């Protein structure tokens, strides 16, 4: 017998499980992170990092003012992404975010996320790589 790890809402919507190359739980996490990173919440970066956002503030603040060419901006961007994951993705723990500029495209950045996810009693390490192009995140 084969079991599926496709999330309930994906099964209800008729979506199939992830590719064979990526386990279904990691595929679901990647998809949910892309969704999180593509929603803007209306807060400034300072408000998002300083206040206690609620579910009404789901997503990221506007990061278009941050430049992938600036080390200071990249560090600030890492803080924003790490905070968003901590607030809105409770399945991930031990999260480490690293953002670097994309050497091929100076206006893009690459997000590298290393984290752990509990699968039953087992703690599994997951890695995500995403490309941010003009404020839009997509898997790299």
Image (tube, rainbow, N blue to C red):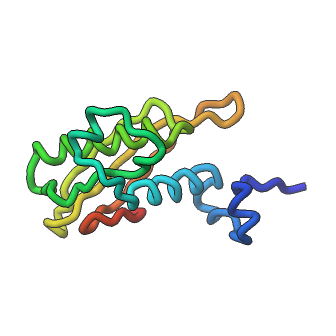
Q: Is residue 92 above or below residue 62?
A: above
Q: Viewed as shown, does residue 4 lie left or right of 29?
A: right
Residue 110 locus on image (x, y percent): 28, 56
Give the position of the C terminus as an image quadrant: bottom left
Q: In the rendered picture of this protein, how many numbered marks are placed on residues?
A: 0
Question: At 45% across and 47% down in the image, what residue appears?
Answer: 56
Residue 121 locus on image (x, y percent): 70, 28
Question: At 39% across and 61% down in the image, what residue appears?
Answer: 38
Q: Quadrant of residue 9?
A: bottom right
Question: At 39% across and 56% down in the image, what residue appears?
Answer: 37
Residue 100 locus on image (x, y percent): 22, 51
Q: Viewed as shown, does residue 79 lie left or right of 130?
A: left
Q: Give 87 or 82, whichever is nearer the viewer.
A: 87
Q: Give 48 or 116, whichever is nearer the viewer.
A: 48
Question: At 90% across and 55% down in the image, what residue appears?
Answer: 1
Q: Quadrant of residue 123?
A: top right
Q: Quadrant of residue 130?
A: bottom left
């Amino acid at each position: 017998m084969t079991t599926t790890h496709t999330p309930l809402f994906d099964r209800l919507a008729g979506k199939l499980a992830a590719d064979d190359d990526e386990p279904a739980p990691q595929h679901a996490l990647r998809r949910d992170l892309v969704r999180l990173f593509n929603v803007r919440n209306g807060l400034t970066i300072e408000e998002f990092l300083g206040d206690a956002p609620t579910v009404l503030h789901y997503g990221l603040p506007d990061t278009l003012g941050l430049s992938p060419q600036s080390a200071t901006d990249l560090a600030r961007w890492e803080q924003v992404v790490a905070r968003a994951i901590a607030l809105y993705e409770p399945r991930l723990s031990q999260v480490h975010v690293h953002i670097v500029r994309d050497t091929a495209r100076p206006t893009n950045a690459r997000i590298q996320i290393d984290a752990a996810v509990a699968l039953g009693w087992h703690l599994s390490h997951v890695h995500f790589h995403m490309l941010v192009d003009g404020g839009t995140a997509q898997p790299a």
